[in-house]
Amino acid sequence: MSNKYNKVILAYSGGLDTSVIIPWLKENYGCEVIAVAADVGQGGELSDLEARALATGASKLYILDIKDEFVNDYIFPTLKAGAVYENQYLLGTSFARPIIAKRIVEIAIKEGADAIAHGCTGKGNDQVRFELGIKAFAPNMPVIAPWRTWELKSREDEIEYAEAHNVPITITRETNYSKDLNLWHLSHEGLDLEDPANAPNYKKILELGVAPEEAPDTPTYITLSFEQGIPVALNGKKMNGVDLIFALNEIGGKNGIGILDMVENRLVGMKSRGVYETPGGAILYKAHEMLEQICLDKLTQHYKQKMALEFADLVYNGQWFTPLREALSAFVDSTQKTVTGEVKLKLYKGNIIGAGMTSPYSLYDEDIATFGEDEVYNQNDSAGFINLFGLPIKVQAMLNAKLGK
C-alpha cells in the first residue's frame, strides 16, 4: 500500500466484511484500528460486539445509540415526503447511511484519525452514501474501501481469510446472505436470490414476520394518530418514534405485512434483486398517505407526489446532506401543518386496508360530496365549466374537420 496511516476509524457492524477488514487494515497499513458501530435498532446483532471487535484486532469499540436521531431526523422526514424509490422500496438502508457517516466523522475527529474505512463493495450503493456523508463533514478525510483494492474477490474468499486469521464470524457458507438490519427494515441479497427466476424461500429467510399465508385468519385493527405528519400514538397510546416503529413491526410482522421482492436499479448502473421486510414502515406509509387524502388540497397533493420521486432519488443516491434535499424537506414541512388526525387500518394476510380516518383539518365536506339532495352545490354550474374546460378540444376538432382529418 502506498499510504501509511497511524489510526483508522472503521464503520463496524460485526458482519463478515468488517470483521475481516480489521486484520487486513493492520496487515496492509500498519495502523491502529478503532471500530465504530451505530445502534440503529439492529438489536441482537450488537451482542458481544465489543468482544468480537477486540478479538479481531481493534484497539477499542464505540457503540453509538442513534436510534432516536435516526427516526426523528431521517425516517420521519422521508415518511412525511411520501418518498418511495421506484414505487416500492421504502429506503431502509438508504437513509441509515448518512447519519452513520456523520457520527463516524465525529469520532474520527475526536480520535485524531488519519482515515476512515468502510466495508462497502465496489458494486453497491452504500459506498456512495457513506462517502458522500463523510465528504459533507470531513471533506479532506481519506477513505479506505478494501473491497475496491484487496485480493479477496468474493464472500467465500472472505470466509477463508477469516478462518486463516482466526477471525470470529457468525455466518457459514450456507447462510451467507448479505443482510442489513435496522429498526425500519431487514434486507436480504445474494445466494439463490441473485437469480430473479427463483422464488424467495420465505420460510428460510424471513425474520421480522411471516409470509401472508401463515398470518392469522382473523384481521387485526389498529388506529394511528398523527400530528403535523408525524405518527405520535398507536391505539390511543402516546409513543415515541422508536417504540412506535418497533410495536408496528411486531404487529405487522405477525400479519405478513411489508414483504417486498424487487429488482431495483442501483446507483452504480446495475440491477440487483433483493427481498425487503418493512412491516412497520409499510403500515406508516399507508396511514400517512390516507390522512393526506383528506388534509391536503388537490394542487398541493399532486405536486407533492411529483416531488416525492425526486426526494426518493436523493435519499437512495446518498445525497441527504445537500441544499436540494433540505429545501424539499422545508416544502414538505409546510405541507404537513394540517396533516393531523387518526387513521384506522385493517391488517389481514399481507394487506393493509383502510378502515376510516378523521381530522380536524379535513377538506372533505359530506354536504358537497353527497349523492343525495343538497343545498350547497348547483349542478347546473358544471355545464359552463365543461364548455370552458373543453374549449381547446372543441377548437382542435373544428380545425381537424376543416382540414379533412
Image (cartoon, rainbow, N blue to C red):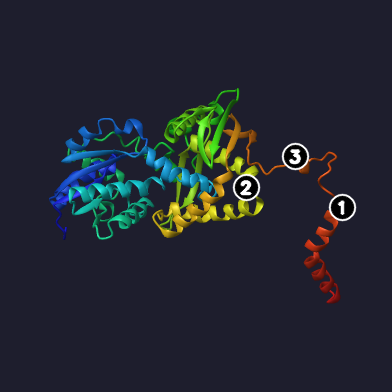
**Residue 225 drawn at (x, y percent):** 55, 34
User: Dividing the image into 4 quarters, which one contains the C terminus?
Assistant: bottom right
Give the residue displayed 85% in from the left and 40% down from the top.
Answer: 373
Placement of 214 over or under 373, stated as above or below: above
Characterize the local packing of mark 2: few (<14), some (14-19) or many (20 or more) Cα atoms within 10 angstroms. Answer: many
| Amino acid residing under circle 1 | Asn
Q: Position of residue 71 (x, y in %)?
A: 42, 40
| Residue occupying the point 32% across, 33% down | 45
- Disc 3: which residue: 366
Going by the numbered disc 3, the residue's amino acid type is Glu
Disc 1 to disc 3, C-alpha distance: 19 Å
Classify 325 as above or below 356: below
Q: Are marks 2 and 3 in contact (CB under 8 Å)?
A: no
Marks 1 and 2, how far apart at CA: 27 Å
Viewer-side residue, 216 vs 251: 251
Question: Label 3's element?
Answer: helix
Whole-angstrom CA distance, mark 2 to mark 3, is: 16 Å
Which quadrant holds residue 226? top right
Can residue 188 be seen by looking at this rendering?
Answer: no
**Residue 252 falls left or right of residue 69:** right
Type of the residue with mark 2: Leu
The residue pinned by badge 2 equals 296
Which one is nearer the viewer's eye here, 355 or 47?
355
State the residue in front, 349 or 367: 367
Q: Estimate how packed mark 1 is, as few (under 14), some (14 to 19) or many (20 or more) residues with alpha carbons within 10 Å.
A: few
